[in-house]
Structure formats: C-alpha cells, structure tokens
Image (tube, grey):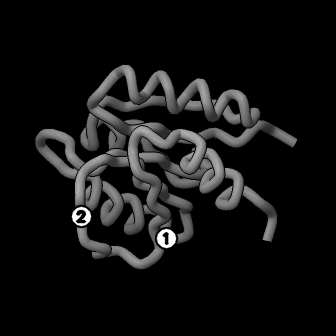
Amino acid sequence: MDAPRILVVDDDESVRIAVCLALAALGCLTDTASGAGEALDRFRPGRYRAVVTDLAMPLMNGLELVRRLRALEPGLPIMIFSGSPWSAELDDVLIARKPDVEALTRLVRRALAPP
C-alpha cells in the first residue's frame, strides 16, 4: 500500500516543518503550501488523502480554503491546526490547537483509518 500523501498549508514555515516531521513519523508523504492560493494551485482531486491547514493566513483564510477544497473533493478529510479562535462554521472538519502536534497526529491517524 502506498504511503498516504497529505497537503500541509500554513504561512509559518516552522509550523509546516514541524507538521511534516510528525506526519513523516506516521509514514505519510507531505506536500506543503505557504498559503491557500498555493494550496489550490497544487490541489487535484484524488492526489491527497487529507489536508492540514491553518486558519489565519493572508489573502485567503483556512475556512475559505476548506470550502473551496470541499467543492473540488467533498469527502476529503481536512484538519484545521490553528492557534486562532474560531467558531465552528464547518461541521465535518477536525480541529487541533497549535502547538499540540500530538493531537494533530491523532486526528490524522483517525482520518486515515479504514472505515
């Protein structure tokens, strides 16, 4: 079985690196984007098994990115990893608070587990 590929979106390079290292320890492959626009440029339905995104990013926030990704691939697991406060506007998104990378990896394991 191929290693799951996950798109990691965050405007903070140190966060992208930390998340990618944690996901690599789970056996995942990662691609990164420094913002929502770059993420949408990289995204193709079927390419990723999941997406991890920050909320507070310049130009387009994480919630708008989630909406756009959902329009392209409705069943894709998406995890928000953010220290920003927010109200739950999307029911089907998993949330982990920065800097709790362990909580994020638990969510990724759950999202990638067979049904």
- Residue 70, percent across and down? 41, 66
> Marks 1 and 2: in contact by CB < 8 Å?
no
Say what secondary structure mark 2 lies in.
loop
Which amino acid, mark 1? Pro
Q: Nearer the viewer, residue 106 or 33?
A: 106
- CA separation, marks 2 and 1? 22 Å
Above or below 110: residue 27 = above
Q: Which label is found at residue 74? A: 1
Q: Is residue 80 left or right of residue 102?
A: left
How many marks are shown on the rendered structure?
2
Dividing the picture into quadrants, the one containing residue 13 is: top left
Give the residue at x 44% y 30%.
32
Above or below 96: residue 74 = below
Q: Is residue 61 left or right of residue 42?
A: left
Give the residue at x 20% y 41%.
57
> Where is mark 2, residue-wise?
86
Which amino acid, mark 2? Trp
Q: Which label is found at residue 66? A: none
